[in-house]
Amino acid sequence: MNKPHPLRDGNRLQRAYYRWALPYYERMAPEMREQVEPLDVVLYTRKGLRVWLGWLGGLLGVGLALHSAGLPWAWALGAGGLVWLALTLAGLSAWMKPEDFLRLQPARLLLRWGAFGLSSGLVGIVAGHWIRHGRFDLPLLAERIADKLPVLLPVMAAAAIGPALLFWGIAAISRRATLRRLERMQLAAERDAAALAAKEAELRLLQAQIHPHFVFNTLATLQHWVDRGDARAGPLLRDLTGFLRAGSEMLGKPLVPLAEEWEAVAHYLAILRARLGERLRTELQIDPACATRAIPPGMLLTLVENAIEHGLEPRIGGGCLQVQARTDAAGWSLVVQDDGLGLAAGAEDGVGLSNLRQRLRHHFGAAASLRLTARPAGGCRAEVHLPS
């Protein structure tokens, strides 16, 4: 479920603004959007009320100062709005694109902003002269400029240099913050990559675990039958070769179709039937719809091995192994059950089941589960539920 977005899921005005801004967000570079969208979230929610009140207060203060200097209210507020808009845009530009400010030498930046401040002051004197007299009286205007210039020069230069230093500082802070964020992202990416590599190596190790005693016992049986010239040696060798080939082909794969896993299980059961004879009976119910479903390699084989090794093989009379694959409304399930010795009191997961639970968590998270229960008539039932 997506996390609520303050603008996208806000009130009507916020939703309208988000719809308007979304095309611009999508055209921005990812690093730019990471800065702009959170800023919009602040400005266009209740958190931004103090920012807007402060901006309007500054506008009114500048307008009041200009009105006290003789400008009509309309001109005073208009000029104040232009000043505050320029300062706001300059501050945002310094934060969003700090390179545009930092690539200038400090002396050149101060000179440029000082010239801008002085020229703005001269424009203000000219505009004020026209507003007061309704015309341009050049001798009077020149006299006024000459009279005001000694005061105007340091005041306007200081008024411009101050914001220039402020914006340069904002750009420097933004640049450092960006570098720190990139460093954190790089460290997080390296940490995640290292964790993923370690997890994949661990999974490859888990997948590579084949019970050596099973192979050794099968080879011992095969050698005995070969020495005796038993006709069962040929089929047993073919099934062992097929089992080892199918198992090796699954190694290194994160997930495999159930049909591919079943090939290895079929060879395994054929080998066990050759060794155990009538002591091992099997009942298989595989829904064809499950054949293409993905499972961690070796999962079904682990459940079948556990059922035979701990339940059926130690039992004198052997027993029946049942394997089912079926779909349900919430996904699908694999069920392996036997009528063997059953779960021992206080039994805990061995290496195979522990590894299996770990691999299920890795691939499916909480959506997958493994349950071991004792059957009322004796034996054990293992059920793995997987998402669709």
Image: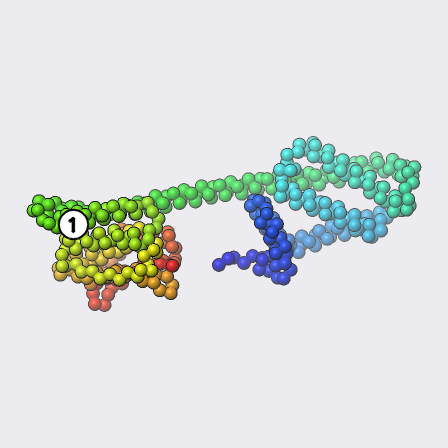
Q: Quadrant of the C terminus?
A: bottom left
| Residue 158 at least partly seen | no
Q: Is residue 131 above or below residue 300?
A: above
Query: Which percent across, then down, holds residue 286?
Result: 28, 60
Residue toward you, 346 or 309: 309
Residue at the image position 62 percent from the left and 41 percent from the top: 97
Q: Amino acid at mark 1?
A: Pro
Q: Is residue 99 above or below residue 308?
A: above
Residue at the image position 34 percent from the left and 43 percent from the top: 201
Query: Which percent across, then down, holds residue 211?
Result: 22, 48
Residue at the image position 62 percent from the left and 40 percent from the top: 98
**Outermost residue, bottom side:** 376
Query: Which percent across, then down, holds residue 88?
Result: 69, 46
| Residue 265 at least partly seen | yes
Residue toward you, 58 or 377: 377
Q: Name the secondary structure under disc 1.
A: helix
Task: Locate residue 191 relative to residue 305 in the image: left or right.
Answer: right
- What crowding class fits label 1: few (fewer than 14 Cα within 10 Å), some (14-19), or many (20 or more)? some
Q: How is the image coloured?
A: rainbow
Q: Is residue 292 above or below residue 191?
A: below
Q: List the residue tagged with mark 1.
A: 235
Residue at the image position 84 percent from the left and 41 percent from the top: 125
**Outermost residue, left side:** 228
